[in-house]
Structures are given as C-alpha cells and as structure tokens.
Image: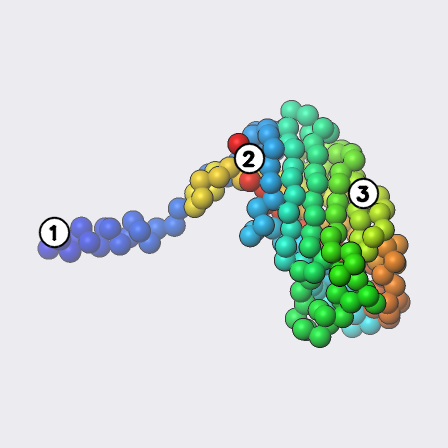
Amino acid sequence: MSKLLTTAAAIILVATPVFADVVKDASKVEAGSYNVEPYHTRVLFSVDHMGFSSYYGEFTKATGSLVLDPAKPDASKLDVSVDATSISTPSDKLTGELKSEAWLDAGKFPAITFKSTKVTKIGAETAHVTGDLTIHGITKPVTLNVKFNGAGINPLDKKYTTGFEVSGKIKRSDFGVKTYVPLIGDEVNLIISGAFEKQG
C-alpha cells in the first residue's frame, strides 16, 4: 500500500505544472542586453478584406536585440529583423503572391527591419517606441505602442526572459506595396508579441 501511495505521489509531482515567477513591475526588470526568443515571438498583421472581414497573416521568423535599463527607459534600444520570406497565411496561393514582386518582392527585399530612434515612457508599464521601419526597400519613421507583460526566469530553459505586447498601424502604400488598394485595405494593423532572453 505504501508503494502505491509513493508511486501516486510521484505521478502527481511530475504532472504538476511548474509556473514561472513573473515580475509584473517594469521597474524591476533586470537591465542588460537581450535577444529575440524566436519560438514565442509572434509578428501578426491584419488588413481590411473588401469591407467583409479583417484578414490576418503572420511572419514566422524574427531575430533581433534589445538593450534595456528600467532606470533609464528612454535609453532603451530595439533592433529587430523579420524574414519577409517567412510570411504565412491560411492560403498557400496567397502566401506565394504576397512574396512576389507584386507585393513584398521578398526575393529582392528579404528583410523587414525596425531600428528604434526614441523611446518615450507613457505609463508604468507602457511606452511609445519610434523608429525606422524598412519594408520593400523603403524606410519610414513609425511609432509603435508597447506594453510590458512581465519578466522572470523561464522554468523550462532557466533563461531570464522579458516580454512585451506591441501594436501599431502603417499604410502599406507608403512602402510601395500598393496592389489592390483600396479594394484590399491600405492600412495594416500590426500585432506583435515579443519575447526576449537576457544574454550573458
């Protein structure tokens, strides 16, 4: 009977999830250099589809770095690159079209980049990040809304991780991507969930 109880206890311990001890106060995040954690970073977008619906897609590959100091949030630096060829939609045909010369021309312009030029703290957990966004070989200044999610040690890989939710709007025609405007919306909504792992 004692063996049965011991085995049951072991099963319960193994099955019990290990939760991360996440800090929700942005002022307590560890300062330092971070890299994009690509497996839990999502770069999504949506556009109006003929007035019937919002059509969503995403880019599945992102890399980049973040320099962060909660004591000096205005001095933070963000440098991110998204692989334009990693664009993905529910339609294989549309995905191929979006990579073509008529849209992103991903063969010629394989990288979408964002380099911050200014960080403005708005609230305890929010900020505006202004930077140079390059799409389709054209660079324009863009301001994004950033909300701090949390930070702490990832219990699975033991790496210190911090995460943010990012949103913003751009006009694709500003970047030379004008196919089917205005039938397909010119305004693109950006929805980004970014995870960053501390280096060193």
Is the Cβ of the residue at disc 3 closer than 8 Å to that at disc 2?
Answer: no
Residue 132: image location, x then y, percent: 80, 43
Please state which of the two labelled residues, at mark 1 or mark 2, is closer to the viewer. Answer: 2
Q: Amino acid at mark 2?
A: Gln
Q: What colour-coding does the image apply?
A: rainbow
Q: Measuring 64% from the left and 28% from the top, which residue is drawn there?
A: 69
For marks 3 and 1, the one nearer the N-term is 1
Crowding near pointer 1: few (<14 within 10 Å), some, many (20+)?
A: few
Q: Measuring 68% from the left and 73% from the top, which residue is drawn there?
A: 91
Residue 87 visible at all: yes
Label 2 SS: loop
Q: Amino acid at mark 1?
A: Ser
Quarter of the figure with residue 72: top right
Q: Amino acid at mark 3?
A: Asp
The front one of 151 and 25 is 151
The front one of 96 and 76 is 96
Which numbered marker is on residue 132?
A: 3
Please determine whether, in this image, residue 40 is positioned above or below residue 120: below
Residue 58 visible at all: no
Mark pair 3, 2: CA separation: 25 Å
Residue 119: image location, x then y, percent: 75, 34
For marks 1 and 2, the one nearer the N-term is 1
Residue 23: image location, x then y, percent: 53, 36
Q: Is residue 176 left or right of residue 190?
A: right
Crowding near pointer 2: few (<14 within 10 Å), some, many (20+)?
A: few
Q: Measuring 71% from the left and 69% from the top, which residue is drawn there?
A: 95
The residue pinned by badge 2 equals 199
Label 1 SS: helix
